Image (tube, rainbow, N blue to C red):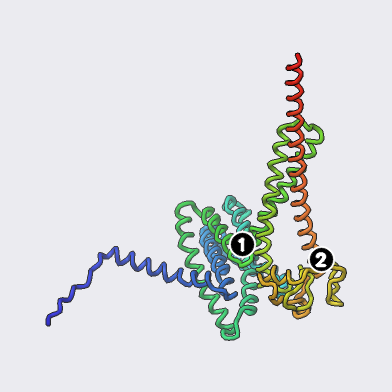
Amino acid sequence: MRVDRARPRRYPWWQLILIGLVGLFEALFRPIARMWRSEDPLDTYGLAHLGSVAGDAMVAVALAGSVFFDIPVGEATSEVALYLVLTMAPLAIAGPFLVPLLDRAGPRRAISFGAALGRAVVCLYAAPRFGTLLLFPSALVLLVLAKVHGITRNGLAVAYAGPNEGLVRANARLGRIGVGGAILGAAPALALLKMGGASAVLYGASAAYAVAAMLNPASLNQVVHMALAAYVATGFGVAAVHAFFLLRDRGSRFHRRAFAIALVVGAVTIPLEVVSGDFLAKMVARNQPAKFAAMEGHYRTAAGAALVIGGLPDDAARETRWAIRVPGLLSFLAHGDFGATVTGLADIPRDEWPPTAIVHLAFDLMVALGVALLALAAVVDSLSRAASYATDIAEIAINQAILMDEDRA
């Protein structure tokens, strides 16, 4: 039996190149997609590290043609010495501040977030001033923050190295992620350098650092929560200003309408703030149990834990005195289950506790202010409706009186 074999399809050279580039692109981004879906803390931090290294690569490309390297060979001795001092200074500046913080587990991700966000701001500042002497202090700040990120990365590698992986493999993973970040950052940096010069590259680096900051697991929830809080505060603040002017001129249509709009913005945003706060609380309970327990004044690990309202935390006695307790509600808020177990401060090393009284009272004050503002909006709305209803009744009565007078006449 004769088998007719089809000849394999031959591709033009440009299609082969395109297929290769697509394969390279897929090979580069497949690990990123896996890290995005992963719940491994080292993977989630790896995304932030990837964005940070991409920003560093873009800064390196931007500075390559700057006054740092544009020096005649015969005059380079003192400048090279100054550059070496400049590159060594960040460790001397950052080290004394970081060591005490890195001894505690809580602030490490916050330090990483701050280092990325700080470099985003510095790049935005330095981009339009690239050809001036202000580039030198800007570059120093960038180097200091880069060193902060590097030291913090080592601390997080120690914290996140799993029992089956070990510190060496964890550092190797972050090293490979760093190489990928450098490749991702270098390509757009060179394109921006051709199109808009070094300043454009610094703007791109600012965007990369901003993305790195947002890739921290807590960033999205915190940014949404604080953005909504800003709308609440602004809405009620603007309403207060127009309420003040309405007391002086009760007939002003401008202040009355502006007051109503501002009050609606503040009142509508509060329920959204509550929803975002629920997501944020669950994230804190999962990733920062010490912080969550301090916020809630919760000392004893328990299933069906009670929500503690008010009261004064007593670290020595490990209890919150004079508080109102709602059984099971804290477990529901933390894990969506009234019977879930919530870790208490008593089961967390003492040196990892936040200042419990300050955190708990500040959290309760925040919640109380939100509830008070929502109640205020409801009262004002009720009074406005009642006043509008009374005005309508008065107008109807006046119209009826006028009609009766006309009939008599």
In the image, taking residue 15 as reference, residue 345 lies left or right, namely right
Q: Position of residue 329 (x, y in %)?
A: 73, 69
Q: Position of residue 182 (x, y in %)?
A: 50, 67
> For this rendering, which residue is in front, 233 or 126?
233
Numbered circle sitting on residue 179: none
Which residue reaches farthest front? 408
In the image, taking residue 331 as reference, residue 176 lies left or right, namely left
- Quick one: label 2, few (<14), some, or many (20+) residues within 10 Å? some
What is the quadrant of residue 137 in the picture? bottom right
In which quadrant will I find the C terminus? top right
- Quick one: label 1, few (<14), some, or many (20+) residues within 10 Å? few
155 lies above or below 73: below
Q: Which residue is mark 2?
A: 358
Question: Residues under labels 2 and 1: Cα distance?
Answer: 25 Å
In the image, taking residue 58 as reference, residue 286 lies left or right, namely right
> Is residue 269 something that shows in the picture?
yes
In the image, taking residue 73 as reference, residue 20 lies left or right, namely left
Amino acid identity at mark 1: Leu
Q: Residue at x 61, y 67 (%)?
A: 217
Q: Position of residue 268 (x, y in %)?
A: 67, 50
Q: Which residue is mark 1?
A: 220
Q: Position of residue 370 (x, y in %)?
A: 75, 55
> Is residue 291 something that shows in the picture?
no
Amino acid identity at mark 2: Ile
Under circle 1, the secondary element is helix
